[in-house]
Image (spheres, coloured by chain):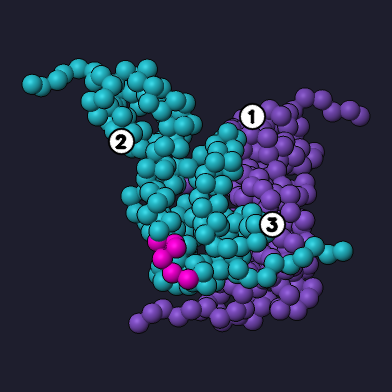
Chain colours: A purple, B cyan
């Protein structure tokens, strides 16, 4: 029995909305898409988008999380010793940007640079989520972990900006292997190397 | 004898336009300002803006260069040995972002993330200008210098993004001294440390 018209809840509408949102955010960025447009692409009532996903911020976060698969990444990161964690983090980061999720990650970074409330989401939700999960497995001094994580984020964000957004050469064309080893050593030092103590 | 109305060329109009452009770009970003609006703020004929500065891209670059004072920065960078260059680069970078030019630098980074042709300016004009000048004084292998410079840029861009745009804590509030020494060691390694060679 074929169904036509707008879909009621529970008929795969959630997945349709998520797919529509993923494509729309990737193509036009966070600011270029309305909830109503996403509902229209998914052929559902706009109220259903709010019912399943709450606010546009929350929908965007859900899209990002569905693209990134944090459980798989975390398993990958924790598959080896702490002393090779830096390279594995950079390798996963490159895989993310060079795979299907790259367009979403790109949309996020562009948006974070322009929209204060998305910057807040990165700062207060995404960053703590991802990094605390890694940090908690690494047996780091909890007093140092947040600053170490922020230094790691500073290098990874800049790598994404130069290699994927600005496409700065010769970094944009450099072999993944070279990038993983060069930047991996930096990430490793930020995670487990000595940090300077404040000058008296 | 007081002059009134629109200023003819040669009466300080160039400086008025530059000041107007600096404020307008800082407040609204590259995309949020037209050449006509800048002329209006400076109280000059729009044709004069084009006469002095060419295109809007060229005006933006001139504003950036006037804010940054590359000669002073270069002198500062070269004031010590190559083995402490990493820390001096980061120290100058923080001074730039935390000083009057910070708003312009912020406007540039926001714009570079969203506008392809500004990304091209960063890639093809600003980056080669600034970095080649430093590189040429450092006696680096010319074959390696561009990739080393791009890795430096990746860390500095990410530092700006996390500390100044997203204001990721505890990095945003960290003492300049800690940031200079921690990130300085990374920049130093990218400049003069060993780079991995490609896997066979």
Please tell me which residue lies in front, A136 or B105.
B105
Which label number is shown at residue B19? 2
Task: Please name whichever residue, A198 or B69, is drawn nearer the observer in this view of the structure.
Answer: B69
Q: Nearer the viewer, residue A190 or B18?
A: B18
x, y percentage for residue B108?
A: 48, 42
Question: Would you call the spot at circle 1 few (<14 residues within 10 Å), some (14-19), or many (20 or more)?
Answer: some
Discs 1 and 2 lie in a common subunit: no
Q: Chain of mark 2?
A: B
Q: Quadrant of the N terminus of chain B?
A: top left
> What chain does badge 3 belong to?
B
Query: What is the count of numbered marks?
Result: 3
The earlier-in-sequence mark between 2 and 3 is: 2
Identify the magenta region: B76-81
Q: Which residue is mark 1?
A: A37
Choose mark 2 or mark 3, whichever is in front.
3
- Residue drawn at (40%, 61%) of the image: B76
- Chain identifier of the residue bearing label 1 in the image: A
CA gap between label 1 and label 3 equals 50 Å
* Secondary structure category for the residue under label 1: helix
User: At which x and y percent is residue A46?
Assistant: 63, 32
Image: B68 above or below B83: above
A173 horizontally vs A160: left or right: right
The disc label shown at residue B143, or none = 3
Q: Residue at x 52, y 78 (%)?
A: A195
Q: Residue at x 56, y 81 (%)?
A: A194
Dot label at residue B45 = none
Both labels 2 and 3 in a single chain: yes
């Amino acid at each position: 029995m074929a169904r036509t018209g707008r879909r009621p809840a529970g008929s795969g509408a959630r997945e349709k909305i998520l797919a529509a949102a993923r494509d729309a955010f990737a193509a036009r960025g966070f600011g270029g898409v309305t909830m109503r447009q996403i509902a229209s692409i998914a052929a559902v009532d706009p109220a259903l988008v709010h019912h399943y996903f709450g606010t546009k911020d929350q929908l965007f976060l859900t899209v990002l999380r569905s693209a990134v698969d944090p459980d798989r990444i975390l398993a990958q990161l924790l598959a080896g010793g702490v002393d090779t964690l830096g390279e594995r983090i950079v390798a996963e980061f490159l895989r993310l940007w060079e795979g299907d999720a790259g367009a979403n990650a790109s949309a996020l970074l562009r948006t974070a640079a322009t929209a204060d409330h998305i910057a807040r989401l990165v700062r207060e939700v995404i960053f703590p989520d991802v990094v605390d999960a890694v940090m908690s497995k690494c047996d780091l001094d909890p007093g140092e972990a947040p600053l170490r994580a922020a230094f790691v984020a500073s290098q990874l964000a800049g790598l994404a900006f130069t290699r994927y957004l600005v496409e700065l050469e010769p970094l944009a064309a450099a072999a993944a292997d070279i990038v993983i080893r060069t930047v991996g050593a930096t990430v490793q030092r930020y995670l487990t190397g000595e940090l300077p103590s404040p000058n008296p």
